[in-house]
Image: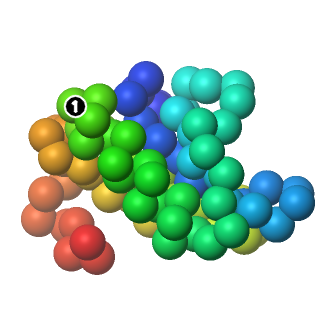
Amino acid sequence: MSKKSDRIVYKNDNGKWVNKKASAKKATSIHDTQKDAEKAAKNNLKNQGGGELITKGKDGKIRSKDTIYPGNDPNPPKDTEH
């Protein structure tokens, strides 16, 4: 289950990459590239005290999760991707 501070990055129907809070209905920001959306989401999380960054692929399935400091990483030894 998502926490209020978690962020989701996904591709919308217009082909743009969206950065939004997991609990929000509207996007915080919209970007041309996934990299830019993830960078913005990480920045938001750092400024809001940390949390989980969830990135979904083009198919809508969760592709990766990254805990942003000072968030509480639920699986620290397994997170070797970031």
Whether residue 40 is visible here, answered yes or no, is: yes
- Indicate whether 19 appears above or below 3: below
Residue 19 shown left or right of residue 58 in the figure: left
Whether residue 62 is visible here, answered yes or no, is: no
Who's the residue at 32% across and 57% down the image?
66
Residue 71 shown left or right of residue 57 in the figure: left
> Neighbour class for label 1 at 10 Å: few (<14), some, many (≥20)?
few
Q: Indicate the position of residue 64 as horizontal and vertical percent values.
A: 44, 65
Q: Quadrant of the C terminus?
A: bottom left
Q: Indicate the position of residue 49 as horizontal and vertical percent values.
A: 22, 31
Q: Indicate the position of residue 62 as horizontal and vertical percent values.
A: 56, 60
Who's the residue at 79% across and 56% down the image?
12
Q: Quadrant of residue 4?
A: top left
Who's the residue at 41% across and 61% down the image?
39
Amino acid at dot 1: Gly
* Residue matched to label 1: 49
Residue 23 shown left or right of residue 41 in the figure: right
Q: Quadrant of residue 6?
A: top left
Identify the secondary structure beneath mark 1: loop
Report the coloring of the rendering: rainbow
